Amino acid sequence: VQLQASGGGLVQAGDSLRLTCAGSEGSFSAYNLGWFRQAPGKEREFVAAIRRRGGTIYYSDSVKGRFTISRDVTKDTGYLQMNSLKPEDTAVYYCATSPQSTITSSMYSARAYNSWGQGTQVTVSS
């Protein structure tokens, strides 16, 4: 599975960005899709995920109500719409895939995801 995240940039607090995760042809349509982020000096943390089957969505408490994950399986593309951005959202954002069999508790763990795209930097100024 080959993934590439894009859409990051430098924005001001309160602005919006939409990140895109593009897969190579047929590369992640059969998998769950997750977004993670990593700030300097911090561990990679879960942001959001969506199941391939059923479309169940999961969010971290820190982004719930502000971020929206979605995917278009026909285009092999995933999205992370980020609204009301805060300086603490500054990080490198990664998209990743996990098997459909991933249990719910593992959907929040980076260890369940076995294919990762290159990250895209999001910087939010105050």
Image (tube, rainbow, N blue to C red):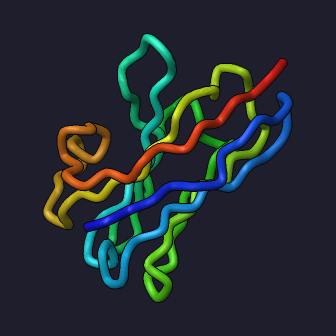
Residue at 65% of width from left, 36% of height from top? 122
Q: Does 86 sit left or right of 37 as displayed?
A: right
The location of residue 113, given as percent across then percent down, is 23, 49
Between residue 51 and residue 6, name the one nearer to us.
6
Quarter location, residue 3: bottom left
- Quarter that holds the C terminus: top right
The location of residue 71, given as percent across then percent down, is 50, 71
Residue at 49% of width from left, 84% of height from top? 75
Between residue 6 and residue 72, name the one nearer to us.
6
Q: Which residue is the extreme one toward the bottom?
A: 74
Residue at 27% of width from left, 69% of height from top? 31
- Quarter that holds the N terminus: bottom left
Q: Compared to 38, does 76 lie above or below?
A: below
Q: Does 47 sit left or right of 34 as displayed?
A: right
Residue at 83% of width from left, 28% of height from top? 13
Q: Which residue is the extreme one toward the top?
A: 41
